[in-house]
Image: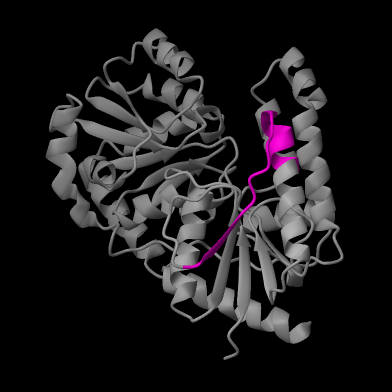
Amino acid sequence: MKSLSIALVRQRYAADGGAERFVARALEALKAKSLRLTLITREWHGGEDFEVLTCRPFYLGRLWRDWSFARCVCRKLAGRHFDLVQSHERIACCDIYRAGDGVHREWLAQRSRVLGRAARLGLALNPYHAYVKMAERNLFTSPRLKSVICNSRMVRDEIKKHFALPDEKLPIIYSGVDTNAYHPGLKEHREAIRARHGIPPDAVVFLFVGSGFERKGLPALLRAMSGLPENCFLLVVGRDKTLAKHQRDAQRLGLFPRVVFTGALDDVKPYYGAADALTLPSLYDPFPNVALEAMASGLPIVTSYQCGAAELIENGKNGFASDSLDVKAQTAFLRDLLDPAIRRRMGLAARKTVEPLTPAAMSEKLIVLYQRLVTKS
């Protein structure tokens, strides 16, 4: 196999970021295939036994941040040769785009469902969202673009709807999950994590993992939790600039001390071991890694139709899915999971569902795609 030179573009690295973890895993998996890898980034706090090119232009505000980074990347690429450039940001100077953030128009449509009239108007007039939609259109209509890696059928169908790209340009490649790192044996942490947060050993613990609580569906989840018995607890792992608001909502619903906000964590694995199920009724989520990690850890998941992970779910077999705002359905699902026999059966099925989705399987599909695109060019 010809040794290919691949440039991967991702603006920044956050330890709790799903897209960043995908890039990190892809880099690790692809290095084993003797590819020549270069990462182009603003900042990266991972392993660096590959070439790293930094684009760190000054900026004020997120619009200038994204625009200046895209401009810097395209300038650097103009002076270098790579067989393929794969971007995880909305830039038009790439051969492959991984649509890990989904379609911005769809996110705005879903977010509008929970906003009042004034807030919806503000969303429509926001210059940052206008910029992202413009960047997205420039990307998907770029003559250079050869392929868009979709991490779910949901995202593929959204791109087809808005930009009319053909199926052959929209391969679906699921993220990989390390089933050796994420496994049912993590239950060894159950007692220690529960004791750390003052949760009784016999309580039923639901786990929410994700930063950006509104997008991940925490408001609806809190309302669903308010309909459960007193022995049900919720661990909320992640960060949000409006944390205080969500804490007040939990207090207003009478959920304290049954809802525990841990903040962002570098290692969530012990919390998968402490939990009985993952709950992620996202307003919009292309395909969160945490769903794969939880299922590999033997947890059933409760998610939404607006989340790409729903396409792995068979209701009542390995998890549940409903509309993101259907609090009544979510409450019913959580009530079903109060039965330990149901949790055990569904947890085993969840693990079996994701066992084929390994990093090795992901990297093989990526390399087949790369070789096909290079051969065609």
* Res 179 quadrant in image: bottom left
Position of 107 with respect to 320 (left or right) is right
Question: Can you say whether 243 is above or below 266 in the image?
Answer: above
Q: Is residue 54 magenta?
A: yes
Q: Which colour scheme is used?
A: one colour
Position of 196 with respect to 104 (left or right) is left
Extreme bottom residue here?
A: 1
Q: In which quarter of the image is the N terminus?
A: bottom right
Q: Position of residue 242 (x, y in %)?
A: 51, 19
The stretch in magenta equals 50-67
Question: Can you say whether 233 is above or below 155 in the image?
Answer: above
Asked whether residue 313 is in view, the answer is no
Asked whether residue 258 is in view, the answer is yes
Residue at screen point 49% across, 66% down = 27
Q: Where is residue 70 in the image (x, y as percent from the top left)?
A: 73, 49
Question: Can you say whether 170 is above or below 3 in the image?
Answer: above
Figure disc tally: 0
Frontmost residue, 234 versus 122? 122
Frontmost residue, 353 versus 215? 215
Q: Position of residue 77 (x, y in %)?
A: 73, 63
Position of 84 with respect to 47 (left or right) is right
Q: In which quarter of the image is the C terminus?
A: bottom right
Q: Where is residue 219 in the image (x, y as percent from the top left)?
A: 49, 23
Residue at screen point 82% across, 24% down = 125
Q: Is residue 319 magenta?
A: no
Frontmost residue, 194 versus 4? 4
